[in-house]
Image (spheres, coloured by chain):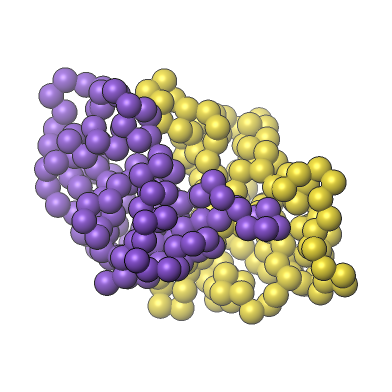
Chain colours: A purple, B yellow
């Protein structure tokens, strides 16, 4: 399994939004912008509701693609980006704790998230990485 | 055909990158980050080379999804984003002129693009809009 190098992990941890693509039942692509983080060699996102289309989609077809915009650019001025092709699965529980961790990157240090008492345990989407692409310094494995 | 409202058109013209999702021959999603602009009621991107996977993909299966990050956020602090589901086609020629126009938004006013003499006429990807989604003020048609 390819691994994200330090530059890619730093990007994921920087608050860069994840454009998560899943496949609908008819094969059409669906995209949601979500918060993602690293958990070991996987990418993870937290979801409080089971009814979300993206979760239904990955249970049927686990192929996903995730893209992130970087703050860096090539010499011409075209922005770098990271693309991760992966295989996703959904596990039960742990969403509030993961969202609380990710909120520190995506909203800011000290954020309390989810902003509700007693959130449901929810679901975690876990993406095993199959291929890493895009434009930038992601290609070097370390 | 749904039309982008002023807020959505302003976002597209702001230099927000387009995460363009197409479908590979095996049905897996592919994503490329590209420059896009409005042309009438369509979204358009310019490509100098015919060999690009995204162009091959839309000639086989025209279903695409495009997502853009906004600078605005909801009251909780979650960033807004625009998602456009569409049907794409590829037309010949016009890529250098379109890229020159888009470079003013994406790199900056006065940019000369493509940065080469005598670029090939290339191809324009044209996306007819089927559905508009995301989080933000895109839902109101005007």
Residue B54: percent from left, percent from top: 57, 70
Q: Is residue B117 visible?
A: yes
Residue B59 versus residue A128 in the image, above or below: below
A119 vs A1, left or right, is left
Indicate left or right for B115 with A81 as reference: right
All told, the count of numbered labels is: 0
Question: Residue at 31% of width from left, 65% of height from top?
Answer: A3
Q: Which of the two residues, A124 or B29, is positioned nearer the viewer here?
A: A124
The answer to whether one can see residue B20 in this image is: no
Give the x, y percent position of residue B14: 67, 39
* The one of B50 and A51 positioned closer to us in this rendering: B50
Residue depicted at x 42% and y 55% = A7
Specify whether A82 is left or right of A55: right
| Residue name at image x 73 percent, y 70 percent | B48
Q: Quadrant of residue A26?
A: bottom left
Residue at the image point whose x is 28% and y is 51% from the top:
A38
Quadrant assignment for the N terminus of chain A: bottom left
Instruction: Name above or below for residue B45 compared with residue A70.
Output: below
Relative image position of residue A141 (x, y in whole percent): 37, 68
Q: Residue furthest right?
A: B118
Give the x, y percent position of residue B113. 80, 58
Q: Quadrant of the C terminus of chain A?
A: bottom left
Question: Eyeballing the image, is A51 above or below A3?
Answer: above
Seen from the viewer's position, the closer of residues A123 and B63 is A123
């Amino acid at each position: 399994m390819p691994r994200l190098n330090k530059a890619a992990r730093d990007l994921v941890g920087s608050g860069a939004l994840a454009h998560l693509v899943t496949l609908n039942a008819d094969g059409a692509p669906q995209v949601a912008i979500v918060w993602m983080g690293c958990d070991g060699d996987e990418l993870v996102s937290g979801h409080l509701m089971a009814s979300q289309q993206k979760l239904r989609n990955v249970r049927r077809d686990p192929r996903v693609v995730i893209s992130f915009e970087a703050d860096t650019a090539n010499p011409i001025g075209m922005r770098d980006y990271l693309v991760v092709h992966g295989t996703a699965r959904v596990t039960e529980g742990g969403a509030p704790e993961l969202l609380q961790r990710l909120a520190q990157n995506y909203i800011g240090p000290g954020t309390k998230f989810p902003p509700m008492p007693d959130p449901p345990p929810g679901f975690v989407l876990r993406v095993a990485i199959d291929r890493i692409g895009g434009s930038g310094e992601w290609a070097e494995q370390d």
